[in-house]
Amino acid sequence: MSDEEHHFESKADAGASKTYPQQAGTIRKNGYIVIKGRPCKVVEVSTSKTGKHGHAKCHFVAIDIFNGKKLEDIVPSSHNCDVPHVNRTDYQLIDISEDGFVSLLTENGNTKDDLKLPTDDNLLSQIKGGFEEGKDLVVSVMSAMGEEQICALKDIGPK
């Protein structure tokens, strides 16, 4: 046996998967699914009867949770689909920079400065308006498959 040390170069991340498999027949409306590589929320599921070759098919209509695009997919109900791990976290809004990034306060007291303002005009005007009035705002950030976006706003009163 040799006494020299072995060094391995790892190009992988921690191994926490961005998705998990779930049988297509068990995915319901308001659940999540990955269609064309995008995390989506299911708005409609219809199942066709078993055909000549014995597979019932599930027809999914879903909306991308980040850009709002409608996507469709048809999968045999016995096959597995990828389901994204979707997390929702609340952060307190500290500041809005001029280049469109927000500064958020995490639960452990650190700041998170890598998120842009949402593209949804209604939500954007609520955040900017509330911030300019000096209100304490809490934003909900949805994260899935390595993407994050502000998706909701709560007003917790004046500062």
Image (spheres, rainbow, N blue to C red):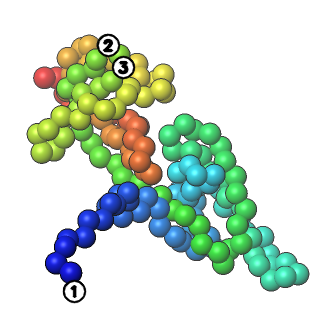
Q: Quadrant of residue 154?
A: top left
Looking at the image, which residue is at 65% across and 43% down?
70
Residue 31 in sight: no
| Marking on residue 1 | 1
Decide: few, some or many residues near mark 2? Use Cα within 10 Å; few <14, some 14-19, many ≥20.
few
| Marking on residue 100 | 3
In x, y percent, where is residue 109? Answer: 11, 39
Name the residue tied to disc 2: 98
40 left or right, relative to 144: right
Q: Quadrant of residue 135?
A: top left
Q: Amino acid at mark 3?
A: Gly
Q: Nearer the viewer, mark 1 or mark 2?
A: 1
35 left or right, relative to 10: right
Disc 3, disc 2: CB below 8 Å? yes
Q: Is residue 137 above or below residue 146?
A: above
Quarter occupied by the N terminus: bottom left
Looking at the image, which residue is at 38% across and 57% down?
11
Residues under labels 3 and 2: Cα distance? 5 Å
Decide: few, some or many residues near mark 3? Use Cα within 10 Å; few <14, some 14-19, many ≥20.
few
